[in-house]
């Protein structure tokens, strides 16, 4: 009986030692603008969304939405050879996030890399490159060359008039609507369906395939067309159809 009492007595301090005060989540907002000779934007985000919108202003304006429990995340911005680079870092073993709302000149080149978070890119006419490990990528009214990669999340697009687009998804669907006939589109997924909607007034050289799923092509096909669409997935359907 004494042994049983001793064991119970030791258990309570052990459980108490497991308690960790995570602290309340705190929020801060930081605004700044950058003027001068900036031709390109690079965003390296750790955890948090990135929203880039093009406009008529000649400057770049940034709003950082910062969330943390104990230690404020480190955010930096610097200009090197005409490229504005934004970085954010969370302290080790702490919960935090930094989301960005960024307004840039419409024709600016934009590169976004996000570890976890949604990327939204709107009203841009320059070259756009975006990569996320976890989160959707949303494209709206973009007209420059596209290179888009998502590992876990969907790639969505509306009113896209880019002449060339490369769209890759490991786990997640691709659904993009083009408002102008592209010269070349490559859309590939490992797990997820691929749906491309393009203007129906021109023929396309279409290469569509899936290992497990259906394929449907509803546009006029011509092997000699200067408008080339390559769409494939391992698991899921592939649909190429006229834009509404």
Image: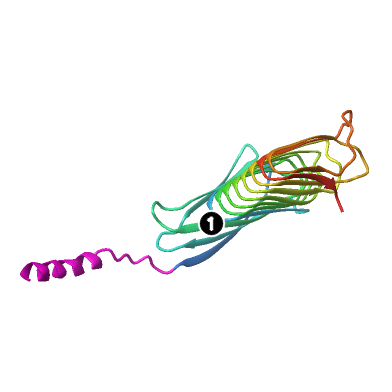
- The quadrant holding residue 222 is top right
Q: Name the quarter where the C terminus is drawn.
A: bottom right
Q: Is residue 43 visible?
A: no
Q: Secondary structure at mark 1?
A: strand
Q: Is residue 178 left or right of residue 79?
A: right
Which stretch did the figure color magenta? 1-24
Q: How many other residues sit within 10 Å of disc 1, few (<14), some (14-19) or many (≥20)?
A: many
In the image, 104 versus 195, the foreground residue is: 195
- Foreground residue, 1 or 74? 1
Q: Tell which of 122 and 218 is nearer to you.
A: 218
Q: Identify which residue is drawn at 65% across, 50% down.
A: 154
User: Could you say where residue 161 lies in the image, as x and y percent from the top left?
Assistant: 82, 45
Up-down: is 233 above or below 77? Answer: above
In the rendered image, which quarter contains the N terminus?
Answer: bottom left
User: Which residue appears farthest toward the top when viewing the image?
Assistant: 224
Counting from the top left corner in percent of width and height, residue 55 is at 76, 54
- How many numbered tags mark residues here? 1
Picture coordinates of residue 82, whole percent (x, y): 65, 39
x, y (%) of residue 148? 67, 42
Q: Is residue 38 magenta?
A: no
Reading the image, the residue beneath label 1 is 98
Q: Is residue 47 left or right of residue 84?
A: left
Q: Is residue 212 above or below residue 27?
A: above
Q: Which residue is painted at 27% across and 63% down in the image? A: 18
Determine whether 53 is above or below 236 in the image. below
Please check the rendered image and state whether residue 3 is part of the magenta-colored stretch, yes or no.
Answer: yes
Secondary structure predominantly adopted by residues drawn in magenta? helix
């Amino acid at each position: 009986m004494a042994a049983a009492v001793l064991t119970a007595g030791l258990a309570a301090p052990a459980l108490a030692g497991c308690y960790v005060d995570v602290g309340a989540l705190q929020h801060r907002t930081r605004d700044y603008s950058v003027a001068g000779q900036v031709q390109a934007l690079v965003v390296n985000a750790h955890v948090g969304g990135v929203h880039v919108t093009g406009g008529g202003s000649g400057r770049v304006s940034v709003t950082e939405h910062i969330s943390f429990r104990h230690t404020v995340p480190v955010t930096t911005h610097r200009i090197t050879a005409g490229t504005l680079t934004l970085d954010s870092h969370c302290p080790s073993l702490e919960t935090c996030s930094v989301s960005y709302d960024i307004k840039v000149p419409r024709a600016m080149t934009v590169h976004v890399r996000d570890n976890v978070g949604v990327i939204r890119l709107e009203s841009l006419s320059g070259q756009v490159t975006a990569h996320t490990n976890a989160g959707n990528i949303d494209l709206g009214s973009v007209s420059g060359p596209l290179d888009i990669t998502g590992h876990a999340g969907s790639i969505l697009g509306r009113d896209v008039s880019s002449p060339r687009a490369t769209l890759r998804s490991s786990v997640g669907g691709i659904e993009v609507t083009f408002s102008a006939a592209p010269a070349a589109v490559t859309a590939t997924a490992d797990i997820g369906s691929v749906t491309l909607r393009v203007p129906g007034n021109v023929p396309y050289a279409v290469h569509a395939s899936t290992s497990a799923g259906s394929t449907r092509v509803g546009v006029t096909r011509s092997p000699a067309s200067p408008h080339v669409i390559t769409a494939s997935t391992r698991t899921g359907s592939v649909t190429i159809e006229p834009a509404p």
